[in-house]
Amino acid sequence: MGEIMDRVAHQGYGLVFVLLAAPMAVPILPPGASTVVGLLYTLLAVQMLTGRRQPWLPERARSWRVSPAAAAMISARVLPLMRRLERFSRPRGLSTAAPLVIWLIAALVLLTGLILASPFPFMNLLPTVALVLFGIGLLNEDAVFLLGGAAISLIVILVVVSGLG
């Protein structure tokens, strides 16, 4: 995992965002899975907000190897979806290297990650879609995907805030 992260460098957040969404694609999640994934997104957003150019992973995570079963699941479910999405994604629009762009994305990822980690019912799918769009947008420097992620993220945040009030 560390080698992969080193190769993608500044696009590492996008890769991790997409990889973290993979468990959320499983129809029946074990209890607490969305909480763990949401907190991981939150930690990544904090790293982005503090100005880290690429995600920091503990040594244990950097040395992690993908199991054959996980690789088969990724190949069967995640890669075909990514290939379909990448047909529509290409570098365009805003530079994702701009500090303001990164800060805004990080703030939305932070709030969306907290919502994903929360016990709100039926709040797994839309936050995950927003986070995948952010991931693809960061990977391909695609402002259209970033704006799509931002729009869905803002809708999710508004739904939760209006439900609390």
Image (spheres, rainbow, N blue to C red):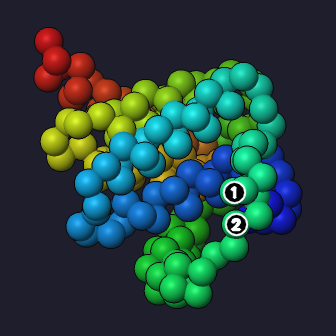
Give me the disc on residue 129.
none
Q: Secondary structure at mark 1?
A: helix
Name the element at disc 2: loop
Q: Is residue 147 above or below residue 51?
A: below
Rendered position, 91 above or below 77: above
Crowdedness near tag 2: few (<14), some (14–19) or many (≥20) residues, C-alpha within 10 Å: few
Which residue is the site of mark 2? 64
Relative to 155, does residue 54 appear above or below in the rendering? below
Asked whether the beta carbons under mark 2 and mark 1 sit within 8 Å of each other, the answer is yes
Residue in the image at 53% along x and 25% along y: 107
Residue 105 at what x, y percent from top left? Answer: 57, 32
Rendered location of residue 78, percent (x, y): 49, 74
Q: Is residue 12 left or right of residue 87?
A: right
The disc label shown at residue 61, or none: 1
**Image quadrant where residue 153 sits:** top left
CA–CA distance between discs 2 and 1? 5 Å
Residue at (66, 24) in percent of width and height: 49
Q: Amino acid at mark 1?
A: Ala
Which residue does the image show at 28% across and 62% down from the upper left?
A: 29
Expressed as whole percent of the image width and height from the top left, the position of residue 51 reads 77, 26
Q: With 160 as the anchor, is 153 left or right in this view? A: right
**In this image, 122 relative to 137: left or right?**
left
- Disc 1: CA contacts within 10 A as few (<14), some (14-19) or many (>=20): few
Report the residue that reaches farthest toward the front: 60
**Tally of marks:** 2
Q: Quadrant of residue 117?
A: top left
Q: Quadrant of the C terminus?
A: top left
Q: Examine the rendering and report whether any part of residue 119 can be seen.
A: yes
Instruction: Please name whichever residue, 115 or 144, is drawn nearer the observer in this view of the structure.
Output: 115
Q: Which residue lies at the image location 18% right of the left edge and 46% below the top edge?
A: 122
Q: Quadrant of the N terminus?
A: bottom right
Give x and y (percent) for residue 64. Answer: 70, 66
